[in-house]
Amino acid sequence: MSGAPDDRRADGSGDLDRSRQQPVLEVEGLRKHFVTRKGFPKPRTVTVRAVEDVSFRIHEGEAFGLVGESGCGKSTAARALLRLIEPDAGRVTWRGEDVIAARGEHLKTLRRRMQIVFQDPYSSLDPRQSVGSALVEPMRVHGIAEGKEARRRAAALLEEVGLPPAALDRFPHEFSGGQRQRIGIARALTVEPELIVADEPVSALDVSVQAQVLLLLKELRQRRGLAFLFVSHDLSVIRWFCDRVAVMYLGRIVEEGPSSRVLADPMHPYARMLRDASPVPDPSRRAALPRILGEIPSAANPPPGCPFHPRCAQAMPACATTLPRWTSAPGEGQGGVACHLHG
Amino acid sequence: MIWFFARRLLAAVPTLLAVLTLVFVIVRIVPGDPALVILGDQATPEAAAALRERLGLDRPLWTQYFDFITSALRGDFGTSMVTGRPILDEVAAVLPHTVDLTVASMLFGTLVGVPVGIWAALHRNRAIDVAARILSLLGLSFPVFVSGIFALLLFSLHWRLFPVIGAADLDDPVDRLHKLVLPTVSLGLIMAAYITRVTRSAMLASLSEDYIRTARAKGVPWRRVVWVHGLRNASIPIVTVVGLYVGILIGNSVLTEIVFNRPGLGKIIVGALNQRDYTMLQGLMVIYCFLIVVVNAITDLLYGVLDPRVQAA
Amino acid sequence: MSALSERTPPLPGEFAAPPPPSAWKRALGKARSNPTTLVGALICLAIVAGAVLAPWISPFDPADQNIIDRLQPPGGDYLLGTDQFGRDILSRLLWGAQISLSVSLSAIFAAMLIGGTIGMVSGYIGGRFDLLVMQVMDVLLSFPSLILGLMVVALLGPELVNLIVAIALTAIAPFARIARAPTLALKERAFVEAGRALGYSHTRILFRHILPNITSEVMVMGTLWLATAVRVEASLSFIGLGVKPPTPTWGGMTRDGFENILDAPWLAVFPGIAILLLVLGLNMVGDGLRDATDPKLRNE
C-alpha cells in the first residue's frame, strides 16, 4: 500500500465534466493472495500473490480497460471486486456503499448493479436450463418480473442482443459460441445493471465472431449508458472499446490513463513493451521488432523492488530494491505511472 | 519410501479410531436401550436395570466410549455373555478356517480374473471377449449363498465329487484343501467376475496409451509390450479392486460358512445372533474393523510399490 | 440443424452447432441399441410385473398350507412344487418379489437422497469440511455391505423398516462419492459463478443448477446399487434377518429350502434362480447405462 492513496488512484477521465462527478465504482488497495500447502513431511506454504495492490475508479457510463499478460491477476481482481472470491484486503465502494462489508439482502441489491460476462461461453450457461428459464430466473429472484411479463422481457432482451424470441425454449447446446455469448450478455442485462465486468468476453470466440460481439457490447453501452470494466489481454480491443485503461503487472497497476494517451505514448517500459508487441494496422507506423526480455515471473515468487525490473531494458539499481511511487502524468486527467524513470 | 510407509501406517490409525467410533455409534446409540433389545420389550424393569449395570450401560456415555476405544486398542474384545469365554479365544479357534477360505477365494478370484481379463482385452469384440463379458456379468450377479447352494447340489449331491460337510481337519493338508475347493469357488466367483471386468478395461485403457504405441514403434515385441508395459499400468486399478474385495470376501464368507457348514467367523456371528449374545456381536464387529483396516493399509502400501507417483504425492 | 436455425437465418459468421442431445438422452438412446441392456430391462420388467400383479396372477394364496400336498415336486397342479408346509412355490415367489423390490427400491432411494445430498453439499462447500465428510464416507465404505447390514439389523431387530435402514446405510457412501465428483467439476464452471453474481442463494445454485446436472450419474449408479441391494436383502433373509415369516421373501425361501435340500432341492433352486435373475437383469441395465454415460468407456 502506498502512503498517499489519493496520488495512486486512477482518477478522472478524458471528459472534464465526468471527472468532477463522483465515480460509480471505487476500488482501493485490493489484495488477494492464494495460499496452498504442499509437501510431506515438511509442508511448505506457497503464497500466490495474484492481486497485490490494485486501485482504480470507474465513472458512470465509462469503459475502463484492465490489460496485462495472462497471470497478472486482472481476472482475479475483477472477481474479487464482485465478491465472487473474497478479497483479503482493500475497499470496494459502489456509489459510496461498501461492497466488501455487504451481507445478505444488501449484497443481493448491490449484485444487481454490477454484472459479469464470462470468457468461456460454453461453461457460462447451465446446460440443463433453457434459455428462457435462464433469463427469467434472475428477474424472479430480484422481484423484477414474474410469469408472462418476465417472459416478454426475456424475449425483448434476446432481441436486443440479436437473437430471435424462438431461442427462449432452446437449450444452450443448440447455440454456437457467439450466440451463447449473446445469451450470457442478455442474462447479465436481466437485472438492469449499471456496470458490466467483461472478463475477456471475446477471446474464446472465433475471430469472425469477435467483432460482432464487440459491436453488440459497444451498442449496449451507448444505448443503456452502461459502465464497463473490460478485462483483456488484447490492446487493439481495449484501444477500440475503452475510455481509460490500466496496465497490470504481477498484481499491481503499473500505468493508468486515457487509452488514447497510454496506448499511443506509454510511459512505463512494460506498457511500451505490450504496445510494441501488439499488431499495428498501419505498416508505416510499425516500429522495430519489440524487445521482449524473459518470461513473466511467477506470482508465487515476485521479485523485490519494481516487479518488472528483471525484464526491463532500462532497469536501474534502484529498481531492484525500491517499489516505485505512483507519479502523475503531465496534464489534467492523464493518469499516472509507477516507474523510477518518471519518479 | 520409508517416509511413505510410515505415513500410510500413521494414516491407518485415525481410520481405525473412526471405524471404532462408527461401531460404538451403531452398537450403543442407534438401538436406543440395548438392554431392551437383548431382553425384548417384555423385560421387567429390574431385569433391564441389572443387565444395564452388568454391561456398564448405566455409566455416562463418554466413559463408555473411552473404555470401548481403549480396551479395543489393547486387544481386549470382551467376553461372551452366553459362554463367558473371552471373545478373542473363540475367534482364534476358528479364525484359521475363515483365513483359509478368504485367502483361497482371493487367490481364485485374482488368478482366474486377471488372465481372463487380459485375454478378453487382447481379443476385444471377438467371440472370446463377448463370452467373457457375458459370463462375468452372470458371475457378478450370483449371491454367494446361491452359488454355494448350486455348487453343493451339482458337485456334492449330484456328482458326489466333494464332501457335503465342510469342517476340515486343520492338521490334514489334503483334507483341508479338498474341503476348501467348493467354498472357494462359490465365494470367489463374484470376485473373479469383477476382476475380469476391471482387468479388461484397465488393459484396454493402458494399451491405448501413447507410450504403448511408442514402445511398439521402437520394435519392442508385442508380448513384452503387453506383459511389461501394459500390465504394470493396469495393475493399479486391479490392486485397488483386490483390496476392496478382501473386505467383501470377509463379509460374504458368513454365507459360505452357513451353506457349507464350515466353522469360522460367520458361524460365530450367526450363533451370537440366535443367542442374542450382545457382547459377542460387539466384539466381533470390532474384530472385523481391525481386519478391514489392516487389509486397507496393506492395499495402500502395495499401491506405493506399484505406482511411484503415489509416493511423490 | 436445429429448428431454430431453420426458421431464422444464422447470424453472419455464426453457425449454429448441430444439437448434441443431453447426456441422459444420449445414454438412453445408446443403451436401447445395446442388446444386453434390452434383455436386462425385459427381465426386470417381467419381475416387476409379476410382483405388481401377484394378487391376481398367483395361482394360490402364498400362505395357504395344504398339508396333504407337502413337498410336491415341480409340474402337476403346482407348477414349481410346494414347500414343507404345502405352500405353492410359484405364488410365494411372486409375492416374495414384492418384498425384494420394495425393500431394495426404498433403501436405494433413501441412500440416493441422503448420500447424494451429502456428496453434493460437501463437494460444493469444499475445504476441510469436505475432507472430513469424505473421510467419514471412506470409513463407511470400507465396511462390507453384508457385515454392516447384518450388525444393524441384528441390533435393531428384523423389521421391514430396519432392513431398509440397514441397506440404505451401506449404500450412502458410494452415492456421496458419485455425487461429489461431478459437483467438484461443476462448481468451477462459470454458470455457477454467474449465479452468484446474479445474487442466487447457495441453496438455489445447489438444487436448481448443480443437482439437474448430476442426476444422470447418480441414477446410473442407482441401477447398479439396486442389484447390490437385492443381493444384500436376500443374503440377510437367508441368514434369518429378513422380513419375518410367514411373509414370503426370496432369501427366506432359499433358507427354508436349503434345510430340505436332500429331499426337495427345487425348494432352494427356484428362489435362488429368481434372485439371480433379478440381480442379473439390474446389472445388465446398469452396465449398459454406465457404458453409455461414461465418456471414457464410450468407445468400448
Image: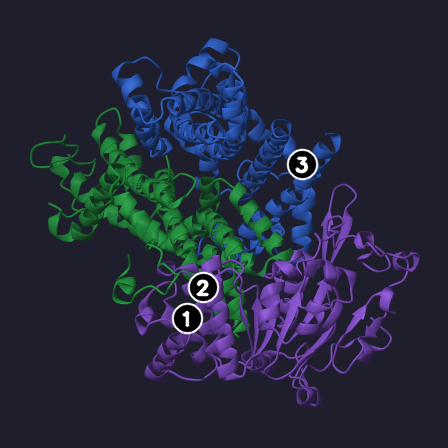
Chain colours: A purple, B blue, C green
- Whether the residues at callouts 3 and 2 have beta carbons within 8 Å, the answer is no
| CA distance for labels 3 and 2 | 57 Å
Q: Position of residue C284 (x, y in %)?
A: 30, 39
Comparing C207 with A126, the one in front is A126
**Residue A125, disc:** 2
| CA distance for labels 3 and 1 | 60 Å
- Whether the residues at callouts 1 and 2 have beta carbons within 8 Å, the answer is yes
Residue at 35% across, 32% down: B145
Asked if residue A57 is positioned above or below residue C219 in the image, the reply reads below
Comparing C218 with A121, the one in front is A121
Comparing A54 with B183, the one in front is A54
Look at mark 1 in the image and give the residue it sits on. A134
The C terminus of chain A lies in quadrant: bottom right
Q: Position of residue C166 (x, y in %)?
A: 44, 50
Chain of the residue under the numbered disc 1 shown in the image: A
Look at mark 3 in the image and give the residue it sits on. B75
Dividing the picture into quarters, in which one does residue B180 lie? top left
Residue at 44% across, 53% down: B40
Chain of the residue under the numbered disc 3 shown in the image: B
Q: Position of residue C294 (x, y in %)?
A: 40, 44
Of labels 3 and 2, the one closer to you: 2
Chain of the residue under the numbered disc 2 shown in the image: A
Callout 3: SS: loop
Amino acid type at mark 1: Ala
Residue at 38% across, 25% down: B186
| CA distance for labels 1 and 2 | 8 Å
Callout 2: SS: loop
Q: What is the count of numbered marks?
A: 3
Mark 1 and mark 2 on one chain? yes
| Residue B59 at least partly seen | no
Mark 3 and mark 1 on one chain? no
